[in-house]
Image (tube, rainbow, N blue to C red):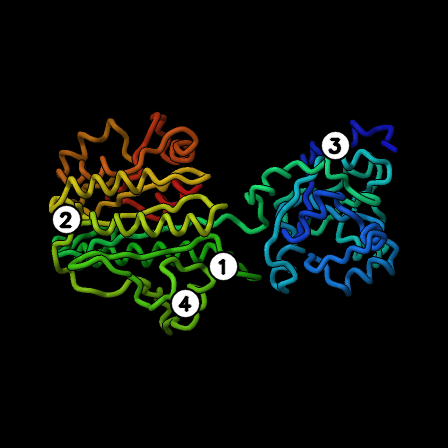
Amino acid sequence: MKRYDAEEFLQALRDKGVDRLYHVTDRENWPSIKKFGLLSLDYLKERSIEPQKSCSDRAKRSRLRKNGISDLVHLTANRNPICLEEALQAERIQDPIVIEISLDVMSEEDSVISPVDALQAKRQGQPFISTLFDIQGLDMSTGDEGTRSQEFLVKGFVPASLILNAAEIDRGENTGAEKKQAVLFILDQTGSMEGNVSIQGQFHASAAHCARALANDTISKLLESCITPKEVKDSYEFALLEYSNETKSGWAQSWDEPFVDCKTLYRQMIRRLPSEGSRTKWAAETESVGQESPAAALRQASSMVQRWLFNNKECPPPIVVLITNGKSLLNDLPGVQKEAGLLKSITSLYGSPRLLCYMVSSSREAFFEFPTSSDRGSLGELTPEAAHLFDLSSILDGDDAIPIRERTGRNDAEFRAMGVNSDLIQLLLAISQ
């Protein structure tokens, strides 16, 4: 039976920022859910269904029955609830999916809200919320750590017709894991990278050394952004290529895979953490020698990007960062232009890879962030190499340009994914938003 004040009740939830609800489970359970809907423990027992992979373990299911709340389906307003983290850590779930439920499910008279985890509420004697008046004083900030344990409780079952993202789950697009951003650095280590430079107030013995330092610092900062007191989030995967006499892995360590995730890097960082507290050197120390064209490195990067996309179909395409002073491009400019075009033409469900060209310049006045077409003349006056890198860089427009406009205050229609002596971490963060 529907609430007499269902419209007002649902609107009060929307006013609190809740426009849909979520249920986390393993993909193994999806065929049954699509057929029968989301069932309470009691309904599951009636149908002799015993989920092998679930957010809750047998002990918790037993406690739910003892406390008289096994006839309820447990939903949340948070897409990343605490129970998901616990289930993943305990390996109760291997392939998580997040099921989106229409808020209409709360229009039923016997649907209630628990201000904390339902079992905890029962033990502490906290009443479930069922009236419009009680909602007014309830904090439902979905990003707030303190509200991630709140539960929306539905009697009996949630019909499959109220699942909003069934088609996406069928296509394999919807998972509980955070979508990772892959970043592939290509470091120019040729003889053309000799000569000291000063960038962002830091002196470097050579442009080749500067390229390594930029990669080291950027990986460390992005890794640090993923480290919390509770966990290390796998928000990024990184790969390093370098080219001099040949194109090869640029990692200082030997990894089994070209792309390395945050948890692996974190373990390496802890093992190798110097006593003086300096940052881990991810990029290998090598001499700047040889004249190999970056075309070979871009060709290898394309192969790496395609393999990564094949294994991570649900994630955005990688960002490829070419760090160079641009002089090595002149060895084979047509080949470089061809390989850069092929790299940027790779397509995936979420778009194409972005090629970010970071130029290391010996000019102390040189500083550009996301240049636009109107800047090309200034880049050309700086060096011919800068203009070539400008043309290689991906164009950022539409939604991609919004965070850049907000950051720079410039209202240009499009930008280039390029930086000259600029802050690489800020460039990457703006592109990956």
Where disc 3 sits, the SS reads helix
Task: Tell me if 422 is positioned left or right of 83 in this view.
Answer: left
Label 1 and label 3: CA atoms lie apart by 36 Å
Q: Amino acid at mark 4?
A: Met
Q: In which quadrant is the C terminus drawn? A: top left
Sequence-wise first label, 4 or 2: 4
Sequence-wise first label, 3 or 2: 3
The residue lying toward the viewer, choosing from 356 and 351, is 351
Q: Which residue is mark 1?
A: 227
Label 1 and label 2: CA atoms lie apart by 37 Å
Q: Which residue is mark 2?
A: 328
Q: In which quadrant is the N terminus drawn? A: top right
Q: How many marks?
A: 4
Give the residue at x 46% y 54%.
225
Q: Sort mark 3 into few (<14), some (14-19) or many (20+) by Cα contacts within 10 Å.
A: some
Instruction: Decide: is 402 above or below 305.
Output: above
Q: Amino acid at mark 3?
A: Ala
Mark in front: 1 vs 2: 2
The residue lying toward the viewer, choosing from 127 and 304, is 304
Sequence-wise first label, 3 or 4: 3
Where on the picture, by quarter, is residue 160? Answer: top right
Question: Which mark, by number, is residue 269?
Answer: 4
Mark in front: 4 vs 2: 2
